[in-house]
Image (cartoon, grey):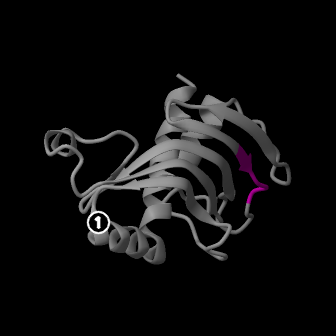
């Protein structure tokens, strides 16, 4: 979501934020709750870093998707092959502020970490979670979900 920062600043009335100022606010969304930090503006590229910490209630991880709600296909096949992640702690830091993705510096802190999961995918499900975590796909897909949740909560 490339225009995330621009939309966020407009929705939250942050247009008057000075170059060297930062702001912190809390959001209760449909899928979770978050603390959002918008940092001081980078003078070179005129963007602001965005740091989001919080928790998402559920994520449904399947071979082709990571979603906050199960897809119709997953429901129709009784969730077989799906890993249900519960109470996911998120720490997402978009240093560039462009909204394209997050950078994982310390995988033990950064990214998305479930407190519990129900694996209906067997060994394939475990491999999928490991692969998505290692590649950064889990964190980046979670970032897109959180962005959407934050923006829709302000409407």
Residue 73 in percent (x, y) is at 16, 44
The residue wearing badge 1 is 122
Which residue lies at the image location 60% right of the left edge and 30% below the top edge? 11
| 86, above or below 10, in the image | below
Q: Can residue 15 be seen in this view?
A: no
Element at badge 1? helix
Which residue lies at the image location 61% right of the left edge and 45% below the top edge? 55
Q: Quadrant of residue 46?
A: bottom right
Which residue lies at the image location 72% right of the left edge and 49% below the top edge? 38
Tell whether 42 sits left or right of 63.
right
Front residue of 58/121: it is 121
Range of residues picked out in magenta = 36-41
Tell whether 153 sits left or right of 72.
right
Front residue of 129/10: it is 129
Q: Can residue 85 be seen in this view?
A: yes
> Outermost residue toward the top?
155
Is 116 magenta? The answer is no
Residue 8 in percent (x, y) is at 60, 39
Is 37 magenta? The answer is yes
Residue 140 in percent (x, y) is at 47, 62
Mark 1: give few (<14), some (14-19) or many (20+) Cα within 10 Å.
Answer: some
């Amino acid at each position: 979501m490339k225009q995330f920062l621009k939309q966020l600043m407009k929705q939250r009335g942050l247009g008057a934020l000075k170059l060297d100022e930062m702001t912190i606010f809390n959001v209760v969304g449909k899928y979770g709750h978050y603390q959002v930090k918008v940092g001081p503006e980078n003078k070179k590229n005129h963007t602001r870093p965005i740091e989001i910490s919080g928790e998402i209630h559920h994520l449904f991880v399947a071979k082709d998707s990571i979603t906050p709600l199960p897809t119709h296909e997953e429901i129709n096949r009784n969730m077989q092959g799906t890993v249900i992640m519960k109470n996911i702690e998120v720490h997402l830091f978009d240093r560039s502020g462009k909204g394209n993705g997050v950078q994982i510096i310390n995988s033990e802190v950064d990214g998305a970490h479930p407190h519990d999961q129900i694996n209906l995918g067997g060994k394939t499900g475990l491999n999928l979670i490991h692969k998505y975590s290692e590649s950064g796909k889990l964190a980046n897909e979670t970032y897109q979900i959180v962005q959407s949740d934050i923006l829709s909560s302000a409407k």
